[in-house]
């Protein structure tokens, strides 16, 4: 029986999540499988890959063939490197300690790269948020200044009208006093 390690789709429309499964090559994509060994979520950045590395390595050593996508994921997680090193140990080319040391060095380097990418994305997101906040603050400051300027202009216009009205009022008051004097006299 030909055994494949492949993806089985689940999730809703346009938000697919995949299970990494070991299945008979003749079984349908989302049909019967032998074992589920992980999951893959391409909707996150970076994509979330959760695979049981020991079970995947065991299946690879037993002859299961990964699909191209799963092969890329297993390479990303270091399962194929571990298989390569394990075959070297079985053939006697290197010792188990050397293989473990090489794999641990590769794993630390890979984790540093992943952490760097996550930090870079988080920093870019924070910078974009800060830039938007600064732009909004500048816009609000400009609006506040415009409102204050209009209020000052309105107060100045009201003061000018009051001054004009107060100048006219004494003139009217004098005219009414003189007309009162004329009527008395």
Image (cartoon, rainbow, N blue to C red):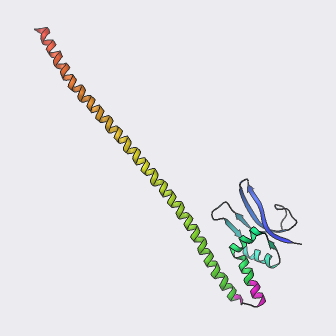
Residue 153, above or below 108:
above
The answer to if 100 sits in the magenta stretch is no
Q: Is residue 23 left or right of residue 145?
A: right
Residue at image point 24% right, 25% down: 165
Residue 14 position in % (x across, y down): 71, 54
How far across and down, in percent of the image, does residue 54 sit?
Answer: 74, 76
Toward the right, the furthest residue is 1
Quarter of the rendering containing residue 175: top left
**Position above or below: 170 against 49:** above
Which quadrant does the N terminus fall into? Answer: bottom right
Q: Is residue 2 left or right of residue 38?
A: right
Question: In the figure, 155 relative to 64: above or below?
Answer: above
Query: Horizontal and vertical percent for residue 78?
Result: 69, 76
Q: State which quarter of the image contains the C terminus.
A: top left
Q: How many marks?
A: 0
Q: Is residue 37 visible?
A: no
Magenta stretch in the rendered image: 86-96
> In the rendered view, does 133 fall on the left or right side of 50?
left
Residue at 65% across, 85% down: 101
Q: Position of residue 174 (x, y in %)?
A: 16, 19
Q: Quadrant of residue 16?
A: bottom right
């Amino acid at each position: 029986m030909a055994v494949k390690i492949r993806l089985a789709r689940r999730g809703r429309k346009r938000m697919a999540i995949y299970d990494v499964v070991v299945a008979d090559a003749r079984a349908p994509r989302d049909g019967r499988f032998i074992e589920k060994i992980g999951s893959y979520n391409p909707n996150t950045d970076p994509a979330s890959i959760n695979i049981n590395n020991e079970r995947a390595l065991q299946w690879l050593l037993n002859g299961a063939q990964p699909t191209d996508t799963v092969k890329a994921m297993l390479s990303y997680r270091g399962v194929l490197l571990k298989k390569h090193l394990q075959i070297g140990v079985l053939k006697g080319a290197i010792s188990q300690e050397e293989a473990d040391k090489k794999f641990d060095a590769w794993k630390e380097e890979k984790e540093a790269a992943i952490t760097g990418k996550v930090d870079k994305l988080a920093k870019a997101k924070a910078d974009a948020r800060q830039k938007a906040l600064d732009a909004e603050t500048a816009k609000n400051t400009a609006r506040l200044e415009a409102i204050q300027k209009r209020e000052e202009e309105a107060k100045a216009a009201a003061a000018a009208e009051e001054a004009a009205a107060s100048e006219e009022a004494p003139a009217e008051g004098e005219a009414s006093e003189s007309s009162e004097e004329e009527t008395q006299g």
